[in-house]
Image: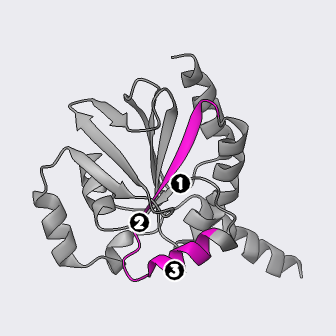
Amino acid sequence: MQLKNILIFSLLITFIFTGCDKKENIDENVVATVKTQTTKTFKLANMDGTYITVSNNKEDWKFEGLENKIVLLNFFASWCPPCKAEIPHLIKLYEKHKNDFVVLGVSVDQEISKEQMAEFMKQYHINYPVTFGTENFYLANGVGGVSSIPAMFMFDKSGKMVRKYVGAVHEEILESDINKFKGN
């Protein structure tokens, strides 16, 4: 029994501190198209049927409708174990800091329907906005590229990118950064 617990703990630690290589599930035609994309404005389809417009002007980012909030772009996929593991922490942080902070889930799933994504969100009790569609890949390129997931980018209230996280991140680290940038 002790050996079984050690094995489970080791696997859990491996998933938590590593990311999923998303290249295995990405169509190379999409990757080639994304790499040639030069648009600095991204119209992201929110799962609730609305759109979130994100624009970039050199180092400044604007998240329409999310002004004066710290924004955490969370690039994830429904098949990625570390992505799933961090969802409860993101929900908790979103609820705790709702007045100053928003998580924006950016799905990089390709072989999943909108209905399947809605079911995934329901299963994991995701209460923050989640975007879905090809435009998400353009955004991934726009923030400098996403080679593994989960990957997160934090923007302060003025729209400046202040942190990049690769792989699962401890809730305490995110909370510390949120508190640091609340005053901006």
Q: Please give the residue where the numbered disc 3 appears in the rendered image.
A: 115
Q: Quadrant of residue 127?
A: bottom right
Q: Please give the residue where the numbered disc 1 appears in the rendered image.
A: 129
Nearer the observer, 28 or 107: 107
What colouring style does the render use? one colour
Q: Amino acid at mark 3?
A: Glu
Inter-mark Cα distance, 3 to 1: 15 Å
- Work out whether 55 lies above or below 124: above
Decide whether residue 61 is among the magenta residues: no
Q: Can I make out residue 145 in this image?
A: no
Q: Position of residue 124 (x, y in %)?
A: 67, 68
Q: Which residue: 32% across, 34% down?
A: 61
- Bounds of the magenta segment: 99-121
Q: Position of residue 104 (x, y in %)?
A: 49, 50
Inter-mark Cα distance, 3 to 2: 11 Å
Q: Please give the residue where the numbered disc 2 appears in the rendered image.
A: 132
